Structure formats: structure tokens, C-alpha cells
Amino acid sequence: MSPFTLLIRTSLANPVQYSKGCETGSSQFTGNVALSVLARIEDCDISRREQLLRLTPWVTQPRMLAEFKHQTPFTVANQTHFVVETNHPKDIPIHDQDCRFVVIEVSSLTQRDVEFTRKLQEEAPAFLDLLLNVKLPAREEHFGRLALPDVSTSVKEEIAESNLTAEEMFANECLKEGDGFVSNGELWEAFGQWCHRTRKVNPFSDSQEFVRRLGSWFTARGIPSDRRSIRGEKLRGRSGVQLKA
């Protein structure tokens, strides 16, 4: 088993109908995935755009398109759960405050444990039964599985930190929520000072791209954009945030 195993959280309705498992592949035919309760993805860089575009509807949509060779495609209720195994933490697209994944670091086994494998096989039907029948909050009220507590692990936090962009690291270190207003110009100036102090290369050629990229950090925290008139000058920025002293 790979060192990093991901259990992908979804916002779908309760799984129903089927109880078989499968391994995902690169084929365009998705029937085996659509009719599975548990699907396995092995050694695949799911941080790549084309992989995310393929995986996202399987996680977020309440129904899946099942395509079999030489058969007419049809849709079924989406009950699939995904387990992703990889040796490379960079393959995992986890970011700050990400609640989509549960990450487990698995130690390598020095030898095959036959008894342990036998017990896992015996427990598999009960495990699938639990997945099929667990009671979840109503989708329309609490977004289904996303209402369940997020299981955070130390390795997940380490991966999320390693995936931070320069502007996200700056925001985590230099900004705090609170009464106040910070203009885009002040943010850009403070970012330049932070890059100089931390000896990081400024990846932005102008402030506009920096402000646009930083927008997702503010959005995730509900910090709104604002425009204020200060000393006769109209300035764009963010309200409800302060620069740390």
C-alpha cells in the first residue's frame, strides 16, 4: 500500500443500490466506477487539471453517467466513495482549510500479514454495509457528507502547508481578521516587504494579478471587498481585516 491514502469526502446523497468495489482506470468507459460503492485510484497525480476535471463530477454530482462498451450510456444514483493511493504527497491537491480529503500515512510492511489480510476480507461486507446505511444529514439542509466533522491529520496539515502559494503564506503570516480596512495598495506594499524579509521571489509583475490571486484567501474567510474614500482618494481593498503589527 502506498504511504499516502486519501478518503475523498463528497456532498452526495446516501449511497444505494450496489455493493461492489472496483479499481479506476484510464478508460473512457465509466460503468464499473458508477456502479461501485468503493473505487480505488492508484499512483495517479490527481492535482493535474485533467485528472481533477474528470474526478470532480464523480464526487460532486448526485447522479453518474455509466458507460459500458457497446451499450447505451445511462445514469445511476452516485454512491461511489474513492480511495486514492500515492507515494507522492505533491499528487494530493490539498490547500488551506481544505475539507475534501482525509489523509492517512501508511507505514510500509516488512512482510505480508496473511492473518490481517484475512480479517480485512472477512470485514469487507460489514464495511460496505456501513457505507450503504450510515445516516447522513439531509442534502438540502446541510450539504450531506460535508456536514460531518472533518478528520484532520498531521500529515494532511503538512501537505496543505507545502502546497501554499506565496500570497497564501503572506496572508497567513501577516493578516488577521478584525475591524478595519486594508487597501489593495497597502496589501501589495506589505507583500513586497514580506518577500524581502523572507527572501522569497515575488512571482507577480504587478499588483493587479497579486490582488486577484489573493481573493480566494479572503473569500474562504468571508472577508468582503470594499471601496472607501480616504483623504479624498477612493481606494479599493478589504474590510474586516488588519495587517499584523
Image (tube, rainbow, N blue to C red):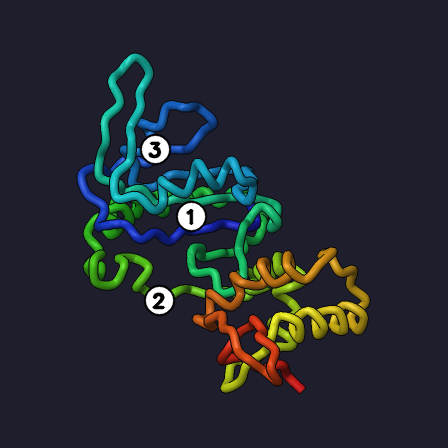
Q: CA distance from mark 3 to mark 1?
A: 27 Å
Q: Amino acid at mark 2?
A: Pro
- Between 219 and 145, the one lying in front of the other is 219
Q: Residue at position x 31%, y 20% from top?
A: 68
Q: Amino acid at mark 1?
A: Phe
Q: Nearer the viewer, mark 2 or mark 1?
A: 2
- Between 117 and 14, the one lying in front of the other is 14
Which residue is label 3 attached to? Answer: 33
Labels 3 and 2 touching (C-beta < 8 A): no
Q: CA distance from mark 3 to mark 2?
A: 26 Å
On the question of residue 182 being in view, the answer is yes
Kind of element beneath mark 3: helix
Q: Residue at position x 26%, y 16% from top?
A: 71
- Between 228 and 146, the one lying in front of the other is 228
Question: Quadrant of the rendered structure where residue 175 is?
Answer: bottom right
Which residue is label 1 attached to? Answer: 116
Q: Amino acid at mark 3?
A: Val
Q: Nearer the viewer, mark 3 or mark 1?
A: 3
Which residue is label 2 attached to? Answer: 149
